[in-house]
Image (tube, rainbow, N blue to C red):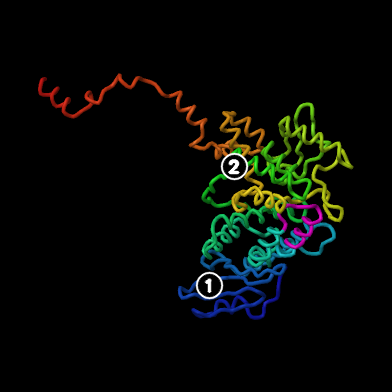
């Protein structure tokens, strides 16, 4: 679009002295000390300030190129508005998308909502809030991580916040709020591995007895599922009776971290679930149904019940969490000599490298394996054959 210029005319530009500048319609021409003229633009486009250098006269740049740059930016903004979701007049800011994201999670029964809300409110919204949700860049995410680390935050904490950001961006892309190719690349930093806490047989027995004595009648069932399957906390709470095949000892998990899978279960757990099913009002429904007044169909957590049982079993609740049941079950499979692909199928890990964390160097299976390399006889080689004195004598004899 051609504009009428009153100040930024060609004669006025030619007449400028070094250090002088003329600004009009968002275009600035500045005569530099070298005599060259530099053109820059400074405009608002869709609520965002755009300030950039277009180029220098010595490179062939004129006022016309600056005008074209402005028109190009505004054209792209208009095209962006054509991609708006149905019923919206403008794009969501990150802050608005974050609030709507939490609201949606509450409606569909999302996981770890309290933690996600805290990450967004305390750190992610203050940093990204004014940007458009579809304008979060790879560089911006990396810069966020560096800023948090420079504030003294551990890499583990930054990774948890980035996990919330990643889940939010993936979710709003799936919901059609932004284009899928607008999602930034979110890479977590390396963090020190925590020691894997594993319970002994005596401790799991004590935990099971304590869970049976808990005032919540489902606590013992939760512990039985954890110790007999190595399933994750959230996976256990989503078990349905109509997804259990008692003949093949398989449980279908439609929503798992690594995708849907068939989870093997032990005969003991199958017997427990079969007996529990006979006592249910809904024999095909949830194994852990939500309380009557809950807005969810199944329970979302068993942490308080589990912690009561841990304390009753005289264990440390800071170390023994529901996830420790998963660590314990997987470690027992490793120590029993189970091959890693089979463990992966039972545990539901995405990769074998994740299963390798459980191959402890002090396990009995390691001792048995290294014994296979134990060759040679102790009396076949004597220290005297390798002493410096003997080698010196041999050289003298020669």
Q: In the displayed structure, would residue 185 be above or below residue 352?
A: below
Residue 350 location, quadrant = top right
**Residue 185 rendering spot, x and y as whole percentages:** 62, 52
**Nearest the eye: 44 or 236:** 236
Residue found at x 70% / y 68%: 45
**Residue 234 rendering spot, x and y as whole percentages:** 72, 46
Residue found at x 80% / y 57%: 85
Residue assigned mark 1: 37
Secondary structure at numbered mark 1: strand
What span is colored magenta in the figure? Answer: 98-113
1 or 2: tag closer to the N-terminus: 1
Secondary structure of the magenta portion, mostly? helix
Residue 105 is covered by the magenta coloring: yes
Q: Quadrant of the C terminus?
A: top left
Q: In the displayed structure, would residue 377 be above or below residue 201?
A: above
Residue 174 is covered by the magenta coloring: no
Residue 84 location, quadrant = bottom right
State the residue lying farthest toward the right. 281
Could you classify mark 2 by the number of other residues whose Cα lies within 10 Å: few (under 14), some (14-19), or many (20 or more)?
A: some
Q: Nearer the viewer, mark 1 or mark 2?
A: 2
Residue assigned mark 2: 199
Q: Quadrant of the N terminus?
A: bottom right
**Residue 240 rendering spot, x and y as whole percentages:** 81, 40
Rounded to the nearest angstrom, the CA distance separating label 1 from label 2 is 74 Å
Residue found at x 46% / y 23%: 372
Answer yes or no: do the residues labelled 1 and 2 have beta carbons within 8 Å? Answer: no
**Nearest the eye: 232 or 57:** 232
Q: In the displayed structure, would residue 246 be above or below residue 287?
A: above
């Amino acid at each position: 679009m051609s504009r009428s210029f009153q100040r930024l005319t060609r004669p006025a530009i030619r007449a400028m002295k070094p250090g002088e500048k003329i600004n009009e319609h968002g275009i600035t021409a500045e005569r530099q000390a070298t005599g060259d003229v530099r053109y820059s633009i400074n405009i608002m486009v869709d609520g965002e300030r755009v300030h950039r250098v277009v180029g220098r006269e010595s490179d062939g740049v004129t006022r016309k190129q600056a005008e074209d740059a402005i028109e190009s930016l505004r054209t792209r903004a208009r095209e962006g508005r054509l991609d708006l979701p149905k019923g919206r007049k403008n794009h969501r800011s990150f802050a608005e998308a974050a609030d709507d994201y939490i609201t949606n999670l509450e409606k569909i029964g999302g996981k770890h909502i309290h933690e996600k809300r805290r990450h967004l409110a305390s750190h992610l919204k203050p940093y990204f809030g004014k940007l458009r949700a579809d304008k979060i860049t790879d560089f911006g995410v990396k810069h966020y991580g560096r800023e948090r680390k420079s504030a003294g935050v551990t890499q583990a904490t930054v990774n948890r916040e980035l996990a919330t950001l990643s889940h939010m961006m993936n979710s709003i892309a799936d919901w059609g709020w932004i284009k899928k190719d607008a999602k930034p690349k979110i890479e977590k930093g390396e963090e020190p591995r925590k020691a894997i806490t594993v319970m002994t047989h005596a401790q799991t027995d004590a935990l099971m007895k304590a869970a049976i004595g808990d005032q919540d009648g489902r606590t013992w069932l939760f512990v039985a599922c954890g110790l007999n399957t190595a399933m994750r906390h959230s996976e256990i709470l989503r078990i349905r009776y109509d997804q259990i095949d008692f003949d093949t000892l398989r449980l279908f998990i439609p929503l798992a971290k690594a995708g849907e899978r068939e989870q093997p279960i032990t005969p003991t757990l199958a017997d427990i679930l079969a007996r529990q099913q006979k006592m249910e009002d809904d024999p095909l429904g949830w194994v852990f149904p939500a309380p009557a007044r809950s807005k969810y169909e199944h329970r979302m957590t068993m942490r308080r019940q589990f912690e009561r049982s841990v304390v009753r079993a005289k264990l440390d609740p800071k170390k023994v969490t529901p996830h420790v049941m998963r660590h314990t079950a997987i470690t027992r499979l490793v120590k029993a000599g189970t091959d890693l692909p089979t463990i992966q199928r039972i545990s539901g890990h995405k990769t074998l490298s994740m299963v390798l964390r459980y191959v402890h160097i002090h396990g009995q299976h390691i001792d048995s394996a290294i014994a296979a390399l134990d060759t040679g006889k102790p009396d076949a080689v004597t220290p005297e054959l390798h002493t410096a004195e003997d080698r010196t004598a041999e050289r003298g004899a020669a």
